[in-house]
């Protein structure tokens, strides 16, 4: 049964003070820090109290929800579709029989739809299921509307749930339940990456696969310079023109630069208990770069 999230998330209105704002170096450290005033984290290039980040991120996605899919196409010139196709086809959902999948920070359901289509088109599998989880009710509503136009609407193959990747309620998402956990372009928005990974490990069955698609580090200096120029000039401008929202798209660009490098993130996945490939890119490695590392797929297996 397709379930519409019952309630929008509560508006969180905690005070937030901007401690610093830096633009000089586009690649910023990602670790949380401790100040005498309390724990802080990053929100794009700003440093904010940890407890404020969730509501700030929520504001961003409330603001972009209705234009999210159009803007994704415009900002990436459609390339995000190729990356998502690549990501899902590498995971081969349905190849070993129906799977129980959870797509966290699933937004408007882009990955869920690809998982279900892949299983059906390649393996005639109509039993694979996806639970889409997102902290933002507005994004889920867009996803729900979109699934209404598909054959999966009103079937047990898809369900939408409001929830925080860092603390999935055990009653709704019991331990050792899922064959596959996906998170695409979502984990960098979360306050604590280790908490997200811990939850991913908990809900997966032993032998289950964790797979993350995220923007990452470009190592080629020439590509990196072009990419920086495009990101910091064109994307906020597109946000202004197409969505009348420069600030949200500025945040999206900045948040990408704060995300850990490929090896650092692979180490975090291992620290959460997953077995990964070797500490290198490509075949047999812990990650696969897409377009020179603009995006990257990390995988791990729960043992
Ligand atoms: C850039 S969108 C990605 C959506 C989708 N996965 C895709 O690839 O199109 C990031 C999503 O992460 C969600 N998100 C941010 N923080 C979250 C959290 N702590 N728990 C669950 N979802 C979160 C946002 O609401 C948003 O829908």
Image (cartoon, grey):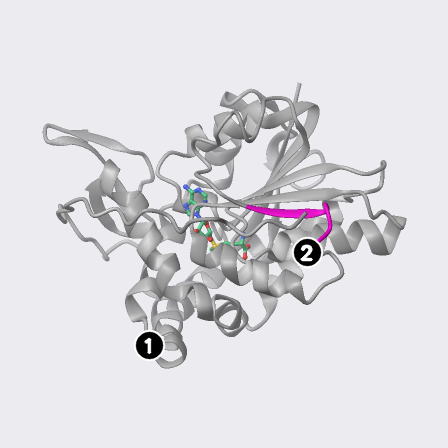
The residue at which mark 1 appears reads as 244
Any magenta on residue 301?
Answer: no
Q: Is residue 287 above or below residue 140?
A: above
- The secondary element bearing badge 2 is classed as helix
Q: Taking the image as drawn, is residue 182 in sight? A: yes
Any magenta on residue 155?
Answer: yes
Kindly give the residue lying farthest to the bottom in the view shown.
Answer: 241
Q: CA distance from mark 2 to mark 1?
A: 28 Å
Bounds of the magenta span?
154-160
In this picture, residue 129 sits left or right of residue 240: right
Quarter holding the C terminus is top right
Disc 2 crowd rating (10 Å Cα; few below 14, some 14-19, many 20+) is: some
On the image, which quarter does residue 96 sit in?
top right
Classify mark 2 as within 8 Å of ligand 1 or not, answering yes or no: no
Counting from the top left corner in percent of width and height, residue 31 is at 32, 34
Counting from the top left corner in percent of width and height, residue 298 is at 59, 39
Kindly give the residue lying farthest to the right in the view shown.
Answer: 124
Residue shown at 48% from the left, 71% from the top = 71
Residue shown at 15% from the left, 48% from the top = 20
In this picture, residue 237 sits left or right of residue 85: left
Disc 1 crowd rating (10 Å Cα; few below 14, some 14-19, many 20+) is: some
Q: Is residue 107 above or below residue 68?
A: above
The residue at which mark 2 appears reads as 113
Considering only order in the chain, which callout, 1 or 2, is on the residue closer to the N terminus?
Answer: 2
Counting from the top left corner in percent of width and height, residue 67 is at 46, 71
Q: Taking the image as drawn, is residue 253 in sight? A: no
């Amino acid at each position: 049964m397709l379930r519409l999230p019952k309630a929008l998330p509560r508006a969180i209105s905690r005070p937030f003070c901007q401690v610093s704002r830096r633009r000089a170096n586009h690649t910023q450290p990602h670790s949380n820090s401790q100040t005498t005033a309390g724990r802080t984290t990053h929100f794009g290039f700003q440093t904010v109290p940890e407890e404020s980040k969730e509501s700030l991120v929520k504001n961003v996605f409330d603001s972009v929800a209705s234009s999210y899919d159009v803007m994704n196409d415009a900002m990436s010139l459609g390339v995000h579709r190729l990356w998502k196709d690549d990501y899902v086809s590498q995971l081969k959902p349905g190849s070993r029989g129906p799977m129980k999948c959870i797509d966290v920070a699933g937004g408007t359901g882009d990955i869920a739809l690809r998982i279900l289509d892949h299983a059906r088109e390649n393996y005639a599998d109509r039993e694979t299921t996806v639970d889409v989880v997102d902290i933002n009710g507005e994004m889920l509503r867009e996803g729900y509307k979109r699934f209404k136009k598909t054959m999966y609407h009103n079937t047990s193959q898809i369900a939408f749930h409001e929830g925080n990747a860092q603390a999935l309620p055990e009653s709704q998402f019991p331990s050792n339940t899922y064959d596959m956990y996906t998170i695409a372009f979502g984990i960098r928005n979360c306050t604590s990456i280790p908490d997200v990974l811990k939850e991913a490990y908990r809900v997966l069955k032993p032998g289950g696969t964790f797979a993350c698609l995220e923007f990452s580090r470009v190592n080629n200096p020439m590509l990196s310079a072009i990419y920086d120029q495009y990101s910091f000039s064109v994307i906020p401008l597109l946000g202004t023109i197409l969505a009348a929202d420069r600030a949200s798209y500025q945040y999206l660009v900045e948040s990408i630069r704060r995300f850990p490098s490929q090896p650092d993130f692979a180490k975090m996945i291992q620290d959460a208990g997953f077995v990964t490939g070797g500490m290198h890119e490509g075949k047999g490695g812990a990650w696969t770069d897409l377009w020179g590392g603009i995006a990257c797929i990390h995988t791990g297996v729960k043992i």
